[in-house]
Amino acid sequence: MTMDVVDYEIFGSEMQYVEVELDPGEAAVGEAGAMMYMQDGIQMDTVFGDGSQQQGGFFGKLLGAGKRLVTGEGLFTTVYHNEGNGKRRVAFAAPYPGKIIPVKLSEIGGTLICQKDSFLCAAKGVSLGIAFQRKMGVGLFGGEGFIMQRLDGDGMAFVHAGGTLKEQTLRPGETLRVDTGCVVAFQPTIDFDIQYVGKLKSAFFGGEGLFFATLKGPGRIWLQSLPLSRLANRIVLSAPAAGGRSVDQGSILGAGMLGGLLGSDE
Amino acid sequence: MNHQTIEGRLFGPGLPGTGAQAGAQWQGERLVVRHAQGEALSSDVHVSASGFNRQQIRLSWRDDTGDFAFMIENAASASSLRANAPAPLKAALDTVANAQTRTGKRFIVTCAAAVLLAVSGVFGAWAAIPFFSEKLAERIPPKQEEQLGELVLTQTRATQRIIDHGVAVDAVRTIGTKLTAGTRFRYRWFISENSELNAFAAPGGVVVVTAGLIAAADCAEEIAGVLAHEIAHAELSHGTRAMFKSMGSRALLSWFWGGVDPASMQIAAHFAELRFSRDAEREADRDGLRRLQMARISPKAMVTMFKKLANQSSKSGMAPPAFLSTHPDIRERIEWLQQTLRESPRLPSRAIEVDWAAARSAVKVPGSGLGK
C-alpha cells in the first residue's frame, strides 16, 4: 500500500506536540482527540478503523476497529487530508507530560511494537494492530500486559511516552535489564523477556518487584523514565485532600475554610 | 550450492543499528548474507528462536569485528532456510521450530483454560447457590428464625398498617391454631390493611393475612387452606432459604452471628414480594394439605380458594397475587390438589367453629368502602 511521506517538527520539551506538514493530497492519521490545530485546506474525516485498508469489507473494518479498541485506542480514527493547493500543516498534541517519538518505519524494517495506548499519529497507510504477548510470564509480570500495539508500514509514525525518553540500539546479544513499565517500544527483532530479581531481600524490599524486564538485541529500543501510572499515583497520593502533606501556610489550621482565609492561590 | 535467497535482516558491526535488509544463501556450511553495503560471511552459526514472542529465527555468529545476527521473520524464508541448511543445523532448526509452536500453543491453551475456568466458576457458583442456601437454612436454630420473623414484622409495620387484635384477628387465630399442632414455632397472627389478596409467613411463626384476602373468602375453611400453605412454608424454613438466596451468604451470616445489617433490613421490608422456588411451593402445597386433613378441615376449600385467586387475577388482567407465586403452573398445582384429593381417603371433616361473617365485616379493606 502506498504511504504518504510527511515532514514534521516537534515542539515543546516536556509537553510536546508534533506539527506535520502534508503535501497536497497527502494525509495523516491521528488518534481521536489528539488534534491540536490544522490549517485551511485540511479536511478532517473520521473513519472506522485506521484507514489503512481500502477494501476490507464491513467485517474486515469491524475486526480492525475491534483490534484497536483492545489496544487502548478508540474504535475510530481521524484522517486529516490535505485538499488544498499547497503544503498544509496539522498538529497533534501529547496527552500527558512526556516525549513524542518519531519513528520512520521503513528504517526499522516496517514494524514497531509499542505499549498500549501510545500511538499518537502517523502518515496515512500505517496500520495499527494488536501484538499479543504470547509468553505468559512476560504478559503477567513484564509490565506491559498481554496486549501491545503493532504499527506496520513504511511511513512515519509518532508514538508518545511519559517522562524522558531513552533511545538505544542493542547489539546482537546485548542485554539490558529494565524496570517493568519503562519499556515503550522496540523492533520485533528484540527479545522481550522477564528475569527474576535474584535475591528475595531485593524482591521484597527493593521496590522493583519480583521481576525485571530484559531486552536482548539486536535492534532498537525506546525506554521511558516515568510511566504515566507512576506519576498519576504519586500525584494522587500527595494531594493534601487525599492524605498527603500540605506545604501551604494554612496547613496547620487545616486545609479547609480557615486555610483558605489565610491565603491560597486558588 | 543453491540459489534460493533467504530474506531477513542483518545486524552487526558496521551495519545500521536498526539492521539492514539482506538476502542470504547457503554455501556449504556457511551463510553468505548480501546487503546494501556488501556481504557478510558466517562462521559457526548458532540457531535460536528469538525476537518478539520468539517468532523470529536468529542465526548468530561471531568474527573478529564483533557479533552478527541474521533475523528471519517470514515463513517462506524460514522454510527455504531449513530446506537448504547443512545437516547439523537442520536438527537445531527443528528444535527452534518446535520451541516456536510450543510457545504459540501454550498461549492458546492458557487463554482457553482461563476462559473456561472463569465460565465454569460463574456457573458453579450460580448452580451452588440453591444447594448452599438450603444447607445453611437448615442450620439456623428456631430462636434465630424467630428473630428474623420479628425483623420482617417490624419492617412490614413500617410500610403497612398491621392489626394484631380484634374480631377478625381472633377468627384467624382460631383457624390457625387448629393447624399448628406440633409445630416448631410459637405462631402469631396479623392482618394487614391492604386490599391486595395476599398472605405470607415470615420465618419463626409470624403469619400476615391481608384484609383483601379476608374479604374475598366466603368461609373460614377457605382461609384455612391459605393458612395451612403458609404454615408449611414457615415450618419448612422456605422463607429463611429465600432470604438467604437474595441476601447472599455474607449478610445472612453476619445476622447469624448477631446483629442485623442493612441488607437484611431491605430484604425483610420486601418479604411479601419474595418468590419461593417451584419446589418450595409444591412442598408447601403438599404439607398444607396434610395439615388440613390432620385438622379435619375440608380440603375442598383450599382448591376453591386457589381457583378464586387464579381466576380473579386473570379476569382483571393483574398478575396473580404474590402469595401464589407468579408461576405459570398455578393451574398445574390446582390440578395436583384435585388429583390428590380424589386419590386420598375421604376423611371426615368438621366445620370450623368461628363466626366468619362477623370476622369478615370486622375487617376494613382500604379503598373498597366495605367494612367499618
Image (cartoon, rainbow, N blue to C red):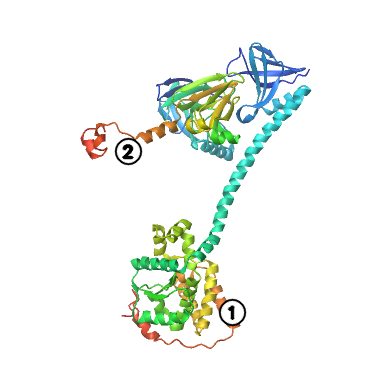
- A147 relative position to A229: left or right: right
Q: Nearer the viewer, residue A242 or A201?
A: A201
| Residue B178 appearing in the image | yes
Quarter that holds the N terminus of chain A: top right
From the top left corner, tell me how far across and down residue A133 is, in percent: 58, 34
Q: Nearer the viewer, residue B65 or A93?
A: B65
From the top left corner, tell me how far across and down residue B156 is, in percent: 37, 67
Neighbor class of circle 2 (other Cα within 10 Å; few <14, some 14-19, many 20+) is: few
Residue at the spot of label 2: A241
Q: Are marks 2 and 1 in contact (CB under 8 Å)?
A: no
Label placed on residue B339: 1
Residue at image coords 47%, 80%: B179
Q: Nearer the viewer, residue B118 or B3?
A: B118
Label 2, label 1: how many angstroms apart (C-alpha)? 71 Å
Between circles 2 and 1, the one closer to the viewer is 2
Neighbor class of circle 1 (other Cα within 10 Å; few <14, some 14-19, many 20+) is: few
Q: Secondary structure at mark 2?
A: helix
From the top left corner, tell me how far across and down residue A50 is, in percent: 52, 33
The amino acid type of the residue labelled 2 equals Ala
Residue at image coords 34%, 38%: A243
From the top left corner, tell me how far across and down residue B284 is, in percent: 52, 73
Q: Secondary structure at mark 1?
A: helix
Quarter that holds the C terminus of chain A: top left
Residue at image coords 22%, 38%: A258
Q: Nearer the viewer, residue A179 or A86?
A: A179
Chain for numbered disc 1: B
The tally of labels here is 2
